[in-house]
């Protein structure tokens, strides 16, 4: 038995947690709040040990007497089995294979044969600024997502930018990639790590769509065959969200699944699982207090000059509501269904953990997951973060407004 390498031990606001990343997050695997014994056992099982060896080493470490040994053995066995049931400990680990790469190769060969290498020569170049990052698109004009229109710039040199990202769309399919390390594999997205880039493949796209994203995040080579119809535009626009967020993460930015309103010159983000009522709640504010909805689904968190802010982004789910501006962040409200309307305070570790679990920024690797948590730790330090249990009645917005007034 040993550690599952898809989990990490992380202390959040002084509280230890064993938390998943990468494929485990995609598979909705739960983490676990633990204690000093859990920390000890996790570190002990960096090497593979049998249950008898775990008992022997831990009883020696805790200086357990002969009289205490039967009860100690029972408690340790129970705790180890709990960690095993959560998937935090495993008997043996199977290394990632090149299976997904092999399947992609078969798809490519068939597509190339069927299309005879059609190439579109109507190439254009457009520049977009989102969150201070300059994205330069180069590719067929008819493939450029119209959703970026409000973020276009014609004078990038006059704008202060944090970094640059070049997106090139090739009207052909790439050569078959060598086997790589599979970081994430599900019905919507495959991510395979190559030596110098990440291969992103989107199985749900009705047209073949593959992206080779450089590890520094500065270049994304995208591959898909024309014609570029509405199905392609939808898939390409949302694929580029992942490409952008990869580089944004390197600059301390992270996207939170949430709807936002502008109130008292600050943005208030309402986040919850689908069906929890975040859109209903923001609409209640708009109807009663005439507060603008800034984004209906996604908000980009950042720290600018020591102040938590939200940058406007074009991705907004099905709401169609977004904004190009940057606003100070007032708070993050975690929305839950309720039979009455009330707010609930939460501890510092819960604030960071629950907000981080609502991020959609990359968490394919341990380093990415830790970067997300670092962003959340900085963001949540000086803002309101609480739970809201609410109905669909107007009283829900009134209760939340009173809570904000109490805080500020």
Image (cartoon, rainbow, N blue to C red):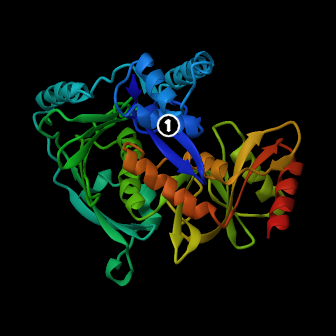
- Across and down, in percent, residue 346 comes to 73, 50
Residue 35 in view in this figure: yes
Q: Quadrant of the N terminus?
A: top left
- Across and down, in percent, residue 277 comes to 72, 42
Question: 356 left or right of 97?
Answer: right
Tell which of 1 and 167 is nearer to you. Answer: 1
Question: Residue at image x 50%, y 46%?
Answer: 10
Is 66 drawn above or below residue 370 in the view shown? above
Question: Residue at image x 17%, y 31%?
Answer: 108
Quarter where residue 93 is shown: top left
Question: Residue at image x 42%, y 71%?
Answer: 132
Tell which of 213 and 250 is nearer to you. Answer: 250
Write down the residue under mark 1: 40
Q: Quadrant of the C terminus?
A: bottom right
Quarter where residue 21 is shown: top left
Quarter where residue 384 is shown: bottom right
Tell which of 26 and 122 is nearer to you. Answer: 26
Question: 96 left or right of 49?
Answer: left
């Amino acid at each position: 038995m040993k550690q599952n390498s898809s989990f990490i031990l992380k202390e959040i606001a002084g509280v230890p947690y064993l938390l998943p990343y990468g494929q485990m997050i995609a598979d909705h695997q739960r983490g676990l709040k633990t204690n000093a014994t859990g920390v000890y056992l996790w570190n002990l099982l960096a090497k593979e040990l049998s249950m008898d060896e775990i008992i022997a080493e831990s009883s020696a470490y805790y200086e357990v007497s002969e009289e205490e040994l039967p009860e100690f053995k029972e408690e340790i066995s129970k705790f180890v089995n709990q960690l095993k049931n959560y998937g935090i400990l495993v008997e043996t680990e199977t290394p990632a294979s090149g299976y997904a790469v092999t399947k992609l190769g078969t798809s490519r060969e068939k597509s190339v044969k069927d299309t005879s290498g059609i190439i579109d020569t109507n190439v254009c170049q457009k520049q977009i600024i989102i969150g201070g990052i300059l994205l330069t698109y180069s590719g067929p004009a008819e493939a450029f997502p119209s959703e970026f229109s409000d973020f276009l710039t014609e004078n990038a040199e006059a704008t202060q930018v944090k970094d640059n990202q070049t997106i090139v769309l090739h009207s052909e399919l790439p050569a078959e990639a060598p086997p790589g390390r599979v970081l994430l594999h599900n019905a919507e997205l495959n991510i395979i790590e190559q030596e110098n880039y990440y291969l992103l493949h989107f199985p749900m796209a009705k047209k073949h769509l593959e992206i080779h994203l450089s590890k520094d995040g500065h270049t994304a080579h995208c591959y898909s065959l024309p014609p570029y119809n509405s199905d392609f535009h939808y898939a390409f626009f949302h694929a580029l969200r992942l490409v952008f967020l990869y580089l944004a993460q390197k600059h301390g930015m992270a996207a939170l699944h949430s709807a936002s309103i502008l109130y008292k010159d600050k943005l208030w983000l309402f986040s919850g699982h689908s069906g929890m009522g975040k859109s209903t709640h923001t609409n209640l504010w708009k109807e009663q207090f005439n507060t603008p909805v800034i984004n209906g689904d996604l908000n980009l968190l950042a720290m600018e000059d020591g102040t938590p802010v939200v940058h406007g982004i074009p991705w907004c789910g099905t709401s169609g509501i977004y904004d190009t501006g940057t606003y100070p962040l007032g708070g993050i409200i975690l929305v839950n269904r309720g039979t009455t309307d009330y707010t609930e305070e939460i501890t510092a570790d819960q604030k960071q953990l629950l907000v981080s679990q609502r991020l959609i920024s990359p968490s394919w690797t341990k380093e990415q997951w830790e970067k997300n948590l670092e962003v959340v730790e900085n963001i949540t330090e000086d803002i309101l973060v609480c739970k809201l249990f609410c109905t669909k009645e107007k009283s829900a917005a009134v209760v939340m407004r009173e809570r904000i007034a109490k805080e500020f």
